[in-house]
Each structure stands twice: as structure tokens, then as C-alpha cells.
Image (tube, rainbow, N blue to C red):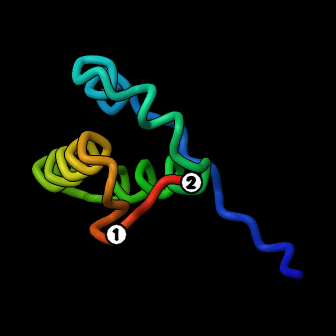
Amino acid sequence: MSALQRPVHPVPDFVLDALLKEGLMDKYKRRPPYQQNDYIGWITRAKRYETQLKRLNQMLSELKTGDKYMGMDYKAK
């Protein structure tokens, strides 16, 4: 068993605002914690604002459809 743990990324205000505006907070919260954290880390690691927005929009789209996670097929349990 590994003791390795991922750093927890705080949700930035612009992501929180987008989730609330799009009515997707519930769908975001239903995702496993590792997925929530991965999305936030992925979005915030982008250096350019345009890239952050592109990644944010991908996350929002995947939450809306519910069948993708970071571009991979996803089926909720």
C-alpha cells in the first residue's frame, strides 16, 4: 500500500462561479474527490488564462453530459 497522496487544490473563485452559474455544483460534488481535485489542479496549472478557460469549459461540458472525465469515458457508480 502506498502512502503517496496528491496535494489538495483549493477551488478558485472563477471555477466556483462557473459551477454555480451553470448549475453544475451538484454534479461536481457527486464526482469522487480525486476527480474534483484533478480537475482543479489541471485547470489551475495552465499558465495562460485562455488555456484555463478552455480546460474549465471542458470540465463543465463533461459534468453536463456526465459520461466523461478528463476526456476519458466515465460511468458513475
Q: Would residue 57 appear left or right of 23 to someone viewing this image?
A: left
Q: Examine the image and state in which quarter residue 75 appears.
A: bottom left
Foreground residue, 31 or 56?
Answer: 31
Q: Quadrant of the C terminus?
A: bottom right
Distance from Cα at disc 1 to Cα at disc 2? 13 Å
Q: Would residue 35 appear left or right of 13 to someone viewing this image?
A: right
Amino acid tagged 1: Asp
Relative to 56, is 27 above or below? above
Foreground residue, 20 or 53?
Answer: 20
Residue at horizontal 27%, vertical 50%?
62
Q: Examine the image and state in which quarter residue 73 appears.
A: bottom left
Asked whether the beta carbons under mark 1 and mark 2 sit within 8 Å of each other, the answer is: no
Question: Residue 77 got which mark?
Answer: 2
Point out the residue furthest to the left here.
Answer: 50
Q: Would residue 50 appear left or right of 68 to someone viewing this image?
A: left
Relative image position of residue 50 (x, y in whole percent): 10, 50
Q: SS class of the residue under badge 2?
A: loop
Are there few (<14), some (14-19), or many (20+) residues within 10 Å of tag 2?
Answer: few
Relative image position of residue 15 (x, y in whole percent): 33, 33
Q: Would residue 8 appear left or right of 62 to someone viewing this image?
A: right
Relative to 70, is 20 above or below? above
Are there few (<14), some (14-19), or many (20+) residues within 10 Å of tag 1?
Answer: few
Point out the residue furthest to the bottom here.
Answer: 1
Amino acid tagged 2: Lys
Relative image position of residue 36 (x, y in whole percent): 50, 47
Foreground residue, 34 or 5?
Answer: 34
Relative to 44, is 20 above or below? above
Residue at horizontal 66%, vertical 63%?
6
Q: Quadrant of the N terminus?
A: bottom right
Residue under numbered circle 1: 73
